[in-house]
């Protein structure tokens, strides 16, 4: 037991291994063990054990609680087995580096992130700084319409890529999808385009980290057999999606 100022550990009777620095710190402790109070009246209502109070007028949430850490002037703990940072005058808490946890996280207000917050589980997801949810892949979803020799015109439904996605007309039945950021990764890029009704067909190929080719064809009936010719046949509002998995 180490009292260092007037009235610190004032009520202690059988408590052991307590350290009190500051006027009336741990002043209510009687039998609690292994507590630390640092600051004027720090932990003044503490009667449990294994707790730390740093800052003037810090106190336990209630008497008899244990394993409680409370830091900050006038901070009030949140019960046994909890850590409380900051008193009522604190408006923001800044933590450097990666913040990791093995339990759940609860917030009474909002959470702001300049990068992202990552959740674990079977499918890792992230809440990004703008509040949107990352699904474990980047995605571009749109409906496409194309006429004559014009480039396909997208109506974008969702886009989480970092760079712009553009469409080009390269010739009859051939179109290019380009990314300025080289974001199309081999073996992790999935491209799908809506099925066209017979006799038309659509196919896609990943040509490079910044280029996807769409080819449209038309089946032509010549007697008992069919053959394919390239043909401008992207119809109005054709579904199109690119996914690049993390």
Image (tube, rainbow, N blue to C red):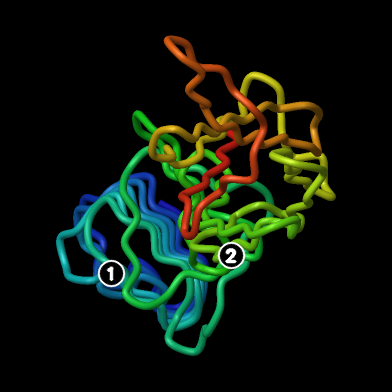
Secondary structure under badge 1? Answer: loop
Judged from this view, the residue extending furthest toward the top is: 224
| Residue 184, placed above or below residue 114 | above
Most foreground residue, 94 or 71 = 94
3D distance between C-alphas at marks 1 and 2: 35 Å
Residue 120 seen:
yes
Give the image quarter of residue 154. bottom right
Quadrant containing the C terminus is top right
* Residue furthest bottom as drawn: 89
- Label drawn at residue 60: 1
Q: Residue furthest front?
A: 223
Q: Position of residue 143 (x, y in %)?
A: 50, 57
Closer-to-camera residue (211/151)? 151
The image quadrant of residue 114 is: bottom right
Coordinates of residue 87 in the picture (x, y in percent) = 45, 80
Which residue: 81% across, 38% down? 210
Q: Residue at x 49, y 81 (%)?
A: 73
Q: Residues within 10 Å of mark 1 (few under 14, many from 20)?
A: many
Are the residues at dot 1 and dot 2 in contact (C-beta closer than 8 Å)?
Answer: no
Q: How far from the left and from the top, in percent, is residue 157?
A: 49, 63
Q: Which mark is in front, 1 or 2?
A: 2
């Amino acid at each position: 037991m180490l009292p260092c100022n007037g009235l610190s550990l004032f009520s202690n009777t059988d408590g052991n291994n307590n350290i009190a620095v500051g006027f009336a710190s741990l002043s209510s402790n009687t039998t609690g063990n292994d507590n630390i109070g640092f600051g004027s009246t720090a932990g003044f209502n503490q009667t449990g054990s294994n707790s730390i109070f740093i800052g003037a007028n810090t106190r336990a949430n209630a008497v008899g609680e244990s394993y409680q850490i409370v830091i900050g002037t006038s901070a009030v703990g949140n019960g046994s087995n909890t850590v409380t940072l900051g008193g009522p005058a604190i408006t923001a808490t800044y933590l450097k580096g990666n913040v990791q946890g093995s339990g759940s996280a609860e917030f009474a207000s909002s959470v702001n992130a300049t990068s992202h917050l990552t959740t674990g589980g079977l499918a890792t997801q992230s809440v990004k700084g703008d509040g949107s949810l990352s699904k474990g892949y980047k995605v571009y979803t749109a409906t496409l319409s194309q006429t004559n020799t014009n480039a396909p015109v997208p109506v974008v439904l969702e886009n989480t890529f970092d760079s712009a996605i553009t469409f080009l007309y390269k010739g009859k039945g051939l179109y290019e999808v380009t990314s300025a950021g080289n974001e199309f990764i081999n073996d992790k890029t999935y491209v799908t385009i809506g099925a066209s009704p017979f006799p038309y067909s659509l196919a896609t190929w990943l040509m490079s980290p910044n280029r996807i080719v769409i080819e449209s064809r038309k089946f032509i009936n010549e007697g008992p057999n069919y053959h394919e010719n390239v043909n401008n046949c992207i119809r109005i509002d054709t579904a199109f999606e690119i996914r690049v998995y993390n």
